[in-house]
């Protein structure tokens, strides 16, 4: 079986690697000229946080997302299993109660517990929730590691190619084009997300921190060399223009609320992109002739890609075995 994967975002790369591991011949086609150039995965937070995501997502996200906690450490050595810390200012303590009522798998912390986990936040928060089983990674380094693994497995990646399904010389096609696939999946909608990257040596964090706020919940994800990715916004829009001034102010204000040192940090990057979502915000695999369309990962690309890739591989292997079984039956008869 020869399989063509269209799209080299996280869904396409994870699917291609899972297929290659199972002995399927794979090629990847990416319209961008370089890795991440046109992939919303490049702006992702990289949080592997199924229990935290349950606060606003369906139980299926927890069930599918837990597979990522096993898959990513086996394929990217930079995966950090340090858990997730959820905090709220004293005036917004009710938000912490609401968050805990929607989630599970956490430990309640007092001020001393928060300080023990993150010493640089000592004295700033009276209580928190610690989701010890969760993890995080740097999306860009993780995607580069997947490309290296694919190259080692002999999987070619063709950049700068607008793949035409009808012209592809493949037995099966896996469409992982994200929002671009609206030409075949009319139910897809865009959800805009905005992020910024700061750099400072004045504060250190060991794990993602979610700061709850009635209007602007914020997450801060530590990366290497004093870099922090800060994100929050979810806007119902497919507008890919740069981060708005209002969003930048809100992100910076919320970062300051976590720790004043972040107000003096260097702004390294501001970026906005649009994530694909189905009406129910759950991912799906749609069969369309010889094509399987993997889409609707919403804000959970790194979290849900491993589970969907496994489902795709299972389907392809099952379809490959059926003709052989039928042939054996006919021959025996």
Image: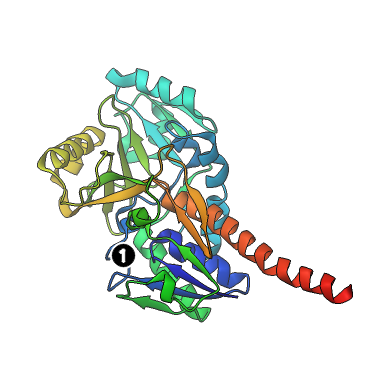
Nearer the observer, 176 or 135 = 176
Residue extending furthest toward the left: 245
Nearer the observer, 239 or 106 = 239
Q: In this picture, is 131 found above or below 127?
A: below
Q: Residue at x 35, y 36 (%)?
A: 210
Q: In this picture, is 22 found above or below 45?
A: below
Horizontally, is 106 left or right of 253 in the view?
A: right
Q: Residue at x 35, y 53 (%)?
A: 182
Few, some or many C-alpha atoms within 10 Å of disc 1 (few <14, some 14-19, many ≥20)? some
Q: Residue 289's spot in the image, x, y percent? A: 53, 62
Q: Circle 1 sits on which residue?
A: 36
Nearer the observer, 154 or 276 = 276
Residue 298 can be seen, yes or no: yes
Residue 132 can be seen, yes or no: no
Q: Residue at x 56, y 65 (%)?
A: 18
Horizontally, is 78 left or right of 37 in the view?
A: right
Where is the C terminus found, in terms of image quarters?
bottom right
Q: Residue 27's spot in the image, x, y percent? A: 47, 76
Label 1 element class? loop
Nearer the observer, 194 or 291 = 291
Q: Residue 262's spot in the image, x, y percent? A: 20, 43
Q: How many discs appear?
A: 1
- Which picture quadrant has residue 19? bottom right
Horizontally, is 45 left or right of 166 in the view?
A: left
């Amino acid at each position: 079986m020869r399989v063509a994967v269209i799209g080299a975002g996280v869904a396409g790369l994870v699917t291609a690697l899972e297929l290659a591991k199972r002995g399927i011949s794979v090629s990847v086609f990416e319209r961008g000229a370089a890795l991440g150039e046109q992939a919303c995965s490049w702006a992702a937070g990289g949080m592997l946080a199924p229990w935290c995501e349950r606060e606003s997502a369906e139980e299926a996200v927890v069930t599918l997302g837990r597979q990522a906690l096993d898959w990513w450490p086996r394929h990217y050595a930079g995966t950090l299993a340090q858990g997730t810390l959820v905090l709220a200012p004293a005036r917004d303590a009710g938000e912490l109660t609401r968050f805990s009522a929607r989630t599970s798998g956490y430990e309640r912390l007092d001020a001393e517990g928060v300080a023990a986990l993150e010493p640089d936040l000592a004295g700033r928060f009276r209580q928190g929730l610690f989701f010890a089983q969760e993890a995080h990674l740097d999306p860009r380094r993780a995607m580069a590691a997947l490309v290296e693994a694919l190259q080692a497995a002999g999987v070619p990646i063709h950049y700068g190619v607008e793949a035409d399904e009808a012209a592809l010389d493949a037995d099966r096609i896996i469409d992982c084009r994200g929002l671009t696939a609206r030409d075949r999946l009319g139910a897809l909608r865009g959800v805009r997300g905005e992020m910024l990257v700061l750099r400072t040596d004045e504060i250190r964090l060991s794990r993602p921190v979610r700061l709850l706020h009635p209007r602007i919940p914020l997450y801060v994800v530590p990366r290497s060399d004093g870099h922090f990715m800060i994100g929050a916004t979810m806007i119902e829009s497919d507008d890919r223009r740069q981060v708005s001034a209002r969003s930048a102010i809100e992100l910076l204000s919320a970062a300051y609320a976590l720790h004043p040192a972040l107000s003096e940090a260097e702004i390294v990057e501001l970026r906005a992109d649009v994530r694909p979502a189905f009406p129910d915000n759950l991912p799906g695999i749609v069969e369309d002739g010889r094509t399987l369309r993997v889409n609707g990962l919403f804000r959970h690309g790194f979290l849900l890609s491993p589970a969907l890739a496994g489902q795709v591989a299972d389907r392809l292997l099952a379809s490959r075995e059926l003709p052989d079984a039928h042939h054996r039956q006919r021959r025996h008869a």
